[in-house]
Image: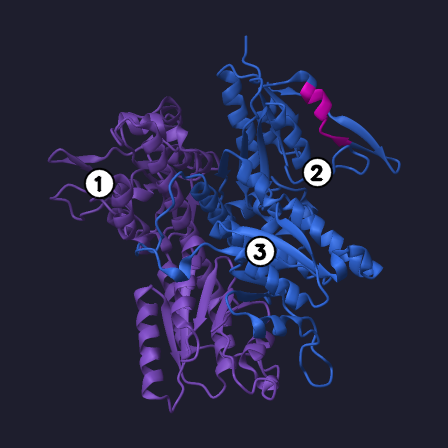
Chain colours: A blue, B purple
Amino acid sequence: MTDGPVEGRPGQLKVFLGYAAGVGKTYQMLDEGRTRAQAGIDVAVGYFEPHGRRDTIARAEGLELIPRRRVEYRGTTFEEMDVDAILARRPALCLVDELAHTNVPGSALEKRWEDVQLLLRAGLDVYTTMNIQHIESLNDQVYQFTGVRVRETVPDWVIRQASEVVMIDLTPGALRNRLARGVVYAPEKASQALEQFFQEPTLAALRELALRQTAHEVDARQSEPAVPPSGRAPAEGPATAAEKVLILVTDDPATAAVIRRGRRVADYLKAECFAVVVCPAGDLGRLPASAREAVEHHLTFARNLRVDTRVLAGKDPVDAVIEFAHRQGISQILVARPQATHPHHGAFRSDLVFRLIERAKDFQVAVVARREPRQP
Amino acid sequence: MTNGEPARPDPDELLRRCQSEEFRAGRGRLKVFLGYASGVGKSYRMLDEGRRRHERGEDVVVAAIQPERRTDVRELLGHLEVIPLVEVDGQRAIDRAAILRRRPRVCLVDGLAYDNPPAWITAKRWQDVEWLLQQGIDVVTSLNVQHIEERADEVARIRGRRSTSTVPVAFLRRADEIAIVDAPEEYCIERARREGIGNGDVAALEHQLSQLRELALLLAADVVDYQLTAYLKEHGGAQPYATLERILVCVTPRADGETMLRRGRRQADRFHGELHAVYVNQPDLSAADATRIETYLALARDLGASVHLLEAADPIATIVELARSQGITQIFIGHSRAPRRWAIWRSNPVEKLIRGAEGIDVRIFPN
């Protein structure tokens, strides 16, 4: 007789975090799942991606696999996690590989992390795997390091929701060896990967990010506030009063990066976070169609990251933002770095940012860089 | 940078490079498994690596292992040859003579931080490991973060007692590989209790372990960062990766330096990042302004900032250059409300900084 899920309480999430494919996240997840099954817990595999890796496949042996759902899309058959089948089967612990996965179009939910929310809400515990480059707020840094714009992302709050985040570490040298031995990918893909994403300094940088993120997750789960790592007394005084962060949303595509940055800064400073847009009469319908679409897209994105969004009424965005900032006690406003300079006199085209800076009295203006891939 | 000419290598840089290549020649490779407490599985990971290397045909021996081990560890040990520790006055040390006779390719050394017997040739086990490396023998070892010399104060604050057996962080930085052995705190609680850490209060023990875990993760991140920086310098001084938050505060007589520095310190702490401060010398400062600058720079040092004092004809360009070389992610600058601001708009330093500091956030503080 094994223990099933406990009724009436949400399930607990555990994340196995890595910094690249092949570090051993799935292996570790399956290994711990087996240990739990041996201890009498009712464990089933909801989804697992074998990638043809022998050691990993061996780890799944003896664990119950819940059959996948087959989906036809444009003449091809895809296999996805079958949430309904898992909910009908109700294991106490469900193992779900690749949290950042995007479901094939036509699925009930777009993302696997959304499917996992359903499992947790039904009281199932979930073990899952993901890589550091899938964390939404790190998207721009990862682009800067690798030149790759990762499309499959998981909002930071999903990771924060986990009761446990564990870093699965392997040294870059060992990972490159595994890659060269053909453990991770098929040969031609492996040699391509070694040349690009899997270059040693890139791997080291991603690994450092993952170590820091895990440390942050451990910190965030501690009951008491941490003493500063510098070992000095905290820098107290009026200058360090509680922070409140405001993100200025416009139709500029760089707004997405500003939202990610604002979300991350607010998380680390334990600050409230708002995203605001200003438009005539507070009605997005009064904006030109293309601007409206971009702004709505940014507001949805902010809400998905659990940023509080507001539409302010005002003819002059600077007036409206300053008024809102005073009312809310905002400590810093994040704006996108003004785009291309004027071809003739070299000044920035948009003066919105500079007018905001001119008139700022009791808040700071943070001009968020447009992060481009670094020069090797 | 200019005219597309190749950058001339810095002679100091070249020297360092030669030295480091010389340093590595003929030397064994060091791999460290770092954990935050007993029971996370450091020894297991070390022995497992030894077993895999042995299976791949490498000549591996166990040069040091602690007694009373879990069954999975004992099972692994069964696959490996062990050179027992020698005992001197009731304390144990690595048997250097036996290893030299046996000359394995790889030695597995558990408990890197152990003290040697008082009469032994070296005081610490890590010094014997250094000797093994000099003999050209590879070493795979395990280490508990509680035994890092430079973190002893933090560990004492967390645990309420101080470890006397320590390894300097410099030794770790020279390791060829460092791997963190991470696990949730619950894994260590049973074991920690048996060893008498904590006083039976599970919540307090969990909190303690959690702080040690964070310490270990950040230490590993620092070692990775140090090695990455060294690697980039060796390979032509490429631009640093923005792997951690590095804040640069621009100190000027007109800006509210105190607020900027304190905010910078707090943000750097929250991000486990670095704080830097820069002052570009301005001739003809009034006595009052010169005093203000001195006060700010003293505060910057008190707050643990790296302080950069520069001379430059073009302060903004120099600050941007400094920021790039240091891998700065955010520049803090004060906004001075100059009376003739519209007239001097084109030469406004804030605008010039925003334009120049592409790829770096600029945070403007009001006066």
Label 2 sits on what residue type?
Lys
The residue sitting at 55% across, 46% down in the picture is A19
The residue that mark 2 highlights is A111
- Residues at badges 2 and 1 in contact (C-beta under 8 Å)? no
The residue that mark 3 highlights is A262
Instruction: Please say if B58 is above or below B334.
Output: above
- Under circle 3, the secondary element is helix
Label 1 sits on what residue type?
Arg
Q: Report x, y in % for residue A142.
A: 60, 55
Instruction: Please say if B202 is above or below B240.
Output: above
Quadrant assignment for the N terminus of chain A = top right
Residue situated in front as seen by the camera: A8 or B185: A8
Region in magenta:
A79-87
Chain letter of mark 3 equals A
Instruction: Report if residue A24 is visible in the image.
Output: no
What is the tally of numbered marks visible in this picture?
3
Same chain, labels 2 and 3: yes
Residue situated in front as seen by the camera: A204 or B273: B273
> What is the number of the mark on residue A149?
none
